[in-house]
Image: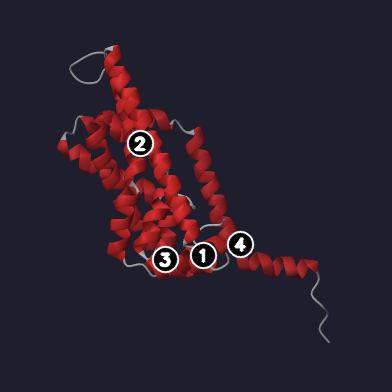
């Protein structure tokens, strides 16, 4: 007669089932810790100076690097601010939004065709992911767009998760593009103000009136972003994709 499984046996079975996810989590923690201790700011400065001298080609290089950063779970805010620093508000928003959309698309396809089983195994045990998946099944691109405006899960992680939902690729890309616009505009604006404070361009320095308009524009952008995010959060609660 087989003896009942003791605590040690149960622990071993549990580790055999979940060790891959803990290894992945540990790897991500080490990656983020490495980013925190590494001179990311200096690298970003070197990178922005380099792409600035490449002209139009530099914008395409920036987009590709941004996309790879999104796939590798690197913080996109740094790159968006850098885009505003190099290309200004409008140009920085366009470049950063293109890079973020490309990165989100690559992660989506990776989640759908390469890591589908693993992501489904993880998301199936998470109530929040389950609620989002069910809502996407009913509302599709509307839920994805709202989640981009008010993300309930980290941006880089959500890109992979959306790949195992029922949404189509093109609706996902378009919803992501529109939903990421307010946040991208905000960070690009921050970068552009940094460029202004450094005296970028032919004109050195700004008058008090110009600084006033820059500050008002920044505050207005922040206010609109917060307002839109709150609307999205309320809408997600009504549609059952967020915890009340």
Position of residue 149 relative to residue 164, above or below, is above
**Residue 186: x %, y % from top left:** 35, 36
| Residue indicated by mark 1 | 131
Secondary structure beneath dot 3 equals helix
Q: Residue at x 27, y 12 (%)?
A: 207
- Residue beneath label 3, please? 136
Mark 3 crowd level (few <14, some 14–19, many ≥20, 10 Å Cα): many
Q: Quadrant of residue 96?
A: top left
**Who's the residue at 21% across and 39% down the image?**
59
The span from disc 4 to disc 1 (Cα, nearest Å) is 25 Å
Locate residue 206 relative to residue 116 in the image: left or right. Answer: left
Kindly check if marks 2 and 3 are in contact, taking CB atoms under 8 A apart as contact. Answer: no
- Of the numbered discs in the image, which one, if any, rests on residue 32? none
Earlier residue among tags 3 and 4: 4
Q: Quadrant of residue 223?
A: top left
Mark positioned earlier in the residue sequence (1 or 3): 1
- Disc 1 and disc 3: Cα gap in Å? 9 Å
Among numbered discs 1 and 2, the one appearing first in the sequence? 1
Quadrant of the rendering where the C terminus is positioned: bottom right
> Which residue, given by chain and number where applicable, does mark 2 sit on?
186
Q: CA distance from mark 4 to mark 2?
A: 39 Å
Q: Which mark is residue 19?
A: 4
Q: Are marks 1 and 3 in contact (CB under 8 Å)?
A: no
Earlier sequence position, callout 2 versus callout 3: 3
Let me know if residue 69 appears in the view.
Answer: yes
């Amino acid at each position: 007669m087989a003896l009942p499984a003791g605590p040690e046996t149960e622990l071993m079975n549990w580790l055999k089932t979940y060790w891959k996810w803990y290894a992945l989590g540990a790897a991500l923690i080490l990656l983020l810790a490495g980013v925190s201790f590494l001179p990311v700011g200096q690298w970003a400065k070197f990178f922005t100076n380099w792409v600035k001298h490449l002209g139009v080609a530099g914008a395409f290089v920036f987009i590709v690097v941004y996309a790879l950063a999104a796939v590798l779970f690197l913080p996109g805010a740094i790159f968006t601010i850098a885009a505003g620093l190099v290309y200004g508000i409008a140009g920085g928003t366009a470049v950063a939004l293109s890079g973020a959309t490309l990165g989100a698309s690559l992660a989506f396809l990776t989640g759908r065709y390469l890591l589908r089983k693993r992501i489904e195994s993880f998301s199936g045990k998470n109530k929040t992911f389950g609620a989002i998946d069910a809502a996407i099944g009913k509302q599709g691109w509307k839920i994805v767009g709202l989640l981009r405006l008010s993300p309930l899960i980290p941006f880089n992680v959500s890109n992979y998760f959306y790949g195992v939902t029922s949404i189509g690729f093109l609706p996902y890309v378009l919803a992501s593009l529109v939903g990421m616009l307010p946040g991208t505009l905000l960070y690009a604006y921050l970068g552009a103000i940094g460029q202004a404070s450094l005296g970028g361009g032919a004109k050195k320095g700004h008058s008090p009136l110009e600084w006033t308009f820059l500050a008002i524009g920044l505050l207005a952008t922040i206010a609109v972003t917060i307002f839109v995010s709150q609307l999205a959060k309320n809408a997600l609660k009504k549609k059952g994709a967020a915890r009340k």
